[in-house]
Image (cartoon, coloured by chain):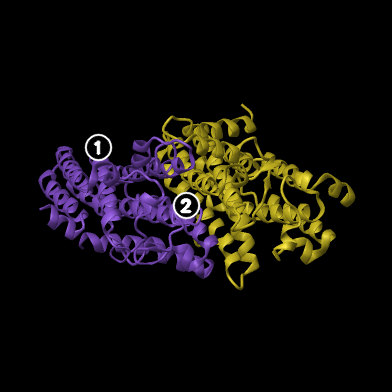
Chain colours: A yellow, B purple
Amino acid sequence: MDVMSRIERALAAAIGRADHPSCPPLLAAAMHHAVFPKGARIRPRLTLAVAAACGEDDPDIADAAAASIELLHCASLVHDDLPCFDNADTRRGKPSVHRAFGEPLAVLTGDALIVLAFQTLATGAASNPQRLAPLVTTVARSVGVPNGICAGQAWECENTADLTLYQQEKTAALFAAATVAGAAAAGAPAEAWRLLGERLGEAYQVADDIRDAVCSAAELGKPIGKDAALGRPSAVLQLGLKGAIARLGDLAGDAVESVPPCPGQTSLRSHIMSETRRLLPKEVARAAA
Amino acid sequence: MDVMSRIERALAAAIGRADHPSCPPLLAAAMHHAVFPKGARIRPRLTLAVAAACGEDDPDIADAAAASIELLHCASLVHDDLPCFDNADTRRGKPSVHRAFGEPLAVLTGDALIVLAFQTLATGAASNPQRLAPLVTTVARSVGVPNGICAGQAWECENTADLTLYQQEKTAALFAAATVAGAAAAGAPAEAWRLLGERLGEAYQVADDIRDAVCSAAELGKPIGKDAALGRPSAVLQLGLKGAIARLGDLAGDAVESVPPCPGQTSLRSHIMSETRRLLPKEVARAAA
C-alpha cells in the first residue's frame, strides 16, 4: 500500500471513532471536515519516510505515529482559525470549521482531535508497548508547553516575543516530532532525528512566508497577506523575496546533510530533495530557476 | 505523604513544565490559574483511593493517573467557561481564565492542559511501561469521542439531545476514568471498576444540580441558576429538591455496592460513604437529616 493510502486509512480509522450513535452528529461531521479531504499531509509523509529509512518493522505503530501528527496539525489549524486568533473564513479551499459549524463546535473539534491523537498512538502500539512512552512524550512536547505549538501560538498574546522561539515552536516543533516519532516508531534511536525535522520545519515556514506574499487566496485555499496584516515575522519581509528563496535552498541542503546514518539514508535524502522542491509555488520556482 | 499532598505535588510537577524561558509567561500563569489553588480534587482522590484499594505497588504511576484526570477536568472547565459556551465570569471563587487572561489564552490553556495530561501519564509510567496503553486509552475515552466530555458538551450544539447520554458523557465519563485508571495504575483488572465511577459521576451530577438550585454564587464560587437559564436537564427540575436528595442517597448506596472485590474493599466503601455525604451542601444535609 502506498504512503498516501496508508495515511488516509489511518486517519479514517481514527476519525471513524466519532461515527457512533453516542457521538453528536455535528461534532463527528466537524471532525471529518477538519481532517478530510486530504491536505498535502507533509508531516505524516515525513514520519513514514523516516520510519522506512530506519527499517520499519511494525507498520501499525508507524501509521499511528503519522496519523497522530496529522491530527494534531489539523487541531492546531481549527483553533488557529478561531475568531479570537486569525478569524479565518477559509482553510484548504473551504469554510473553516467555525464558519461551517460555529465556534463552540470548532473549540470541541480541536479538543477532540488532540485527544484522538494520543488515543491513536496507544491503539497503534499494541504490538510494541515499550515504544509508546517515547512516542507520547515526543508528540506531547511538540504541541504542549514549554516548546510546542500552544507555546508558540501564545507568544502572540505577549507584548514582546522572541521571534525565533515563536517560529520554532509554532512550526518547527511538529516537524521535529514528525521525524523523531518516525524513528521511535521503528524502534531506532530517535533524538538524532530532531535536527532534520527542525530544518525542514524552518524550510516549510520560509516557503509559507513566500506563498503568503506572492500567491492568490484562491491558489492557497486560505486568506493571504495575513503575516503583514498581523505584524508577524516573515522571511520575505526580513530578506526580500530573492533572499527568502535562497534561504529556503540553504535550509533544504542543511536538512539533507542532517539525515543520520540509517539503512535507507540515500533514498530518504532524495525524498527530502524532491519534497522541499515542491514547497515552492510553481511560478516562483520557475522565476528562480 | 497524605493523598492531597500527593495530588498537589503531582499537579505542581506537571504544571511546572511551563515554567521555562521558552514558554510565554502569560500562558504559564494562565495554566497555573486554571489548576491552583486546589479545588476539591474529587476525581484524583477517587483515583488514588481505588489504586490503594487494589494494592497500589507504584505510587508514581498512580500519582500520574490522578494528576492526568484532574488536568483534564481543569481543561474542560476552562473551555466550558468560554464566551461561546457558558460565558462564565467566575470559577472556584475567582475570575475564569478567559476573564483573567483573555479568550486566546483560555483556548490555549485548555489545549495545553489536555496535552499535559497525556504527557504526565507517559512520564509516570516509566517503571511500568506495559500499563501506559490501557491508561492512555481509558483517559482518552473519557474526554474524547464518541463517549467523552467533548461529545457530551457537543450535545449542546444539537437541536435534540439524549439527556442521559449528555450527562453520562459530560460528567460520569471522567468519574469512570478516575476509577478505571486507579485500578489500571495498580496493575489490577480495571474495567470492573467502571460501574463505580459511573454511579459516583451520576451522584455528583445530582449533587451539582442541588447546589445549583439552592446555593448562593458566593458559596459556590461560580455563577448559579445556569441550568434553568440554559434549559439544561437538572435532577431538581425533574424530581423536586426532596426527590433529588433521595436520588443522591440511592446512587451513593449503589456505588458502595458496586465496589469490586479487592484487598481494600472495606475501607474503600467507608471512603465512598463519607465522600458522597460531603457532596451535599451542609444546610441541605441538615434539612434532609
Residue A181 appears at what percent x and percent y?
Answer: 53, 46
Residue B85 is labelled as 2
Mark 2: few, some, or many residues within 10 Å (few <14, many ≥20)?
some
Q: Is residue A170 above or below residue A266?
A: below
Disc 1 from disc 2: Cα separation: 29 Å
* Residue lying at 25% horizontally and 54% vertically, measured from the top left: B45
Residue B18 appears at what percent x and percent y?
Answer: 46, 64
| Chain letter, disc 2 residue | B
Residue A232 appears at what percent x and percent y?
Answer: 69, 64
Residue type, mark 2 in image: Phe
Q: Is residue A266 above or below residue B46?
A: above
Query: Residue B163 vs residue A178: left or right?
Result: left
Under circle 2, the secondary element is loop
Marks 1 and 2: CB-CB under 8 Å? Answer: no
Residue type, mark 1 in image: Leu
Query: Residue A111 vs residue A161: left or right?
Result: left
- Mark 1 — residue? B195
| Chain letter, disc 1 residue | B
* Residue lying at 38% horizontally and 45% vertically, measured from the top left: B232
